[in-house]
Amino acid sequence: MKVIAQNIARSSFVREGSRAWSEQIKTRPEGGVKIYIQFVAVLLLLVPPGTAQQGSVSRDGNEWVQAIDGTLAGAKILRVKLDAGSVKVEGGSQAGITYEVRNRAGGSEEQAHRQLDNYKVNAYVRGDTAWIVGEWSGEHRRRFSGDFVVHVPRDMELVNIETDGGGVTASGITGKLQTESGGGPIRLHDIGGSVNAETGGDSIEVGSIGGDANLQTGGGKVTVTSVKGKLNASTGGGDIMLISSGQGAILEAGGGNIQVKQCGGKLRVSTGGGNIEIGDVSGPADIETGGGSIMVNSAKGFVRAETGAGRIALEGVTSARAETGSGAIEARFVAGGSREDSSLETAVGDITLYLPQNLAATLRASIELANGHTIHSDFPDIRVASEGGQWGPKTVTAEGALNGGGPTIKITTTTGNISIRRAN
């Protein structure tokens, strides 16, 4: 009723304005032109910035398709908010904003039209913000879907996208991007600024991000190719794959596997029970899993690796604290860099430590229940001793200082062999 009243008011205004302009033209032509200009200016102000659009409807197989196309003036900010449907935003060289909407509904023609009529699409510009809004006014949606494609200028300062459950795809934006989906997949690439993306339970795929990235999903897989800033990513149950992060990363998985190729700063990784594989870390690394294996290729800072029951393999580390409830530990230390006291500990399993010839370190090793197990050392400065009789528990220990001594390396296993080897 409000819209109808507005339309009646506008019609009355138009009629009265036209009548006044006509009378002025008859009596005073120059006055009529002046009033006409004023009349047109006021009339333009009455045109709403955006109206609900219905679009054309056509049949496509067993579905009915509603097509809506439109343009908006250029704006610094784009906000898309949809009660239904997925959205794709692409940045390019154009000055303005264009959009294409394809809504689909199934059932009979009457049922389909009813569904399509219940979904109102509004597009308008308010201040420096362009809005595209899809609002559902009916009851339950049945056999209904929508696809929104929006083309924007590449130099947008901010793109903000919200969907009730549809997927989100965005690329070619130099500014920031924020998006939230109730449960659809999120795919982002070529975003110059920072990114904040969250979905209730589907996958997140990220290509190139120029700033920081905060990614959260309730249970899907997270895949990140390149983030120049800091990365914070979490999933309730899926895997996490990171190719490159420039300024450090925090990765958390409820139970999936985590793989990192390269991290340019401090790395913190945790999973409830999956395997963890780390490539090269230019800073310290804090790694924890409830029950999977841990592998680290190299790290320039201190490494803490802990698993409830899995194997630990550390390559190219300067200092480390590795602990597993049940599993073997293999560590290869390198000289140089900042070094701290280190420890390698397992309840059940063998421990193998590789040391360079010129490393300055103080070693202490022990096997608590050594019946059938022993300590082997390639370094004469490390002395091996044993305690305990033939019928009682036997303990084997080793101790020594390499190259005058240095930070302590403590090696402990309850039952298993210990080997201290020269690194080739």
Image: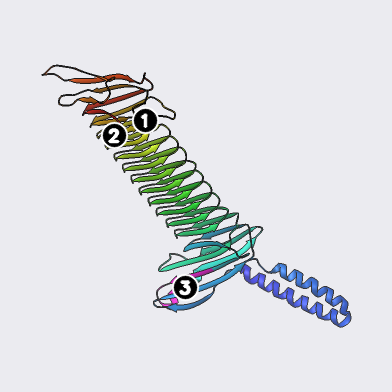
- Image coordinates of residue 265 in percent, x first then y, are 47, 39
Q: Distance from label 2 to label 1 (Cα)? A: 11 Å
Q: Is residue 326 above or below residue 175?
A: above
Residue carrying label 1? 320
For the residues bearing labels 3 and 2, Cβ distance under 8 angstroms: no
- Image coordinates of residue 153 in percent, x first then y, are 60, 61
Q: Is residue 87 above or below residue 34?
A: above
Mark positioned earlier in the residue sequence (3 or 1): 3
Q: Image point 40% across, 78% down: which residue?
A: 61
Crowding at mark 1 (Cα within 10 Å: few <14, some 14-19, many 20+):
many
Q: Distance from label 3 to label 1 (Cα)? A: 65 Å
Q: Three-letter amino acid code at disc 2?
A: Glu
Q: Nearer the viewer, residue 233 or 369?
A: 369
Q: Three-letter amino acid code at disc 3?
A: Arg
Which structural element holds mark 1? strand
Q: Say whether residue 236 is left or right of residue 379.
A: right
Residue carrying label 2? 330
Q: Three-letter amino acid code at disc 1?
A: Ala
Residue carrying label 3? 114
Which structural element holds mark 3? helix
* Residue span colored magenta: 100-112
Q: Is residue 324 above or below residue 371?
A: below
For the residues bearing labels 2 and 1, Cβ distance under 8 angstroms: no
Q: Which mark is residue 356?
A: none
Q: Quadrant of residue 108?
A: bottom left
Q: Is residue 51 above or below residue 272?
A: below
Crowding at mark 3 (Cα within 10 Å: few <14, some 14-19, many 20+):
few
Q: Is residue 53 visible?
A: no
Q: Quadrant of residue 5?
A: bottom right
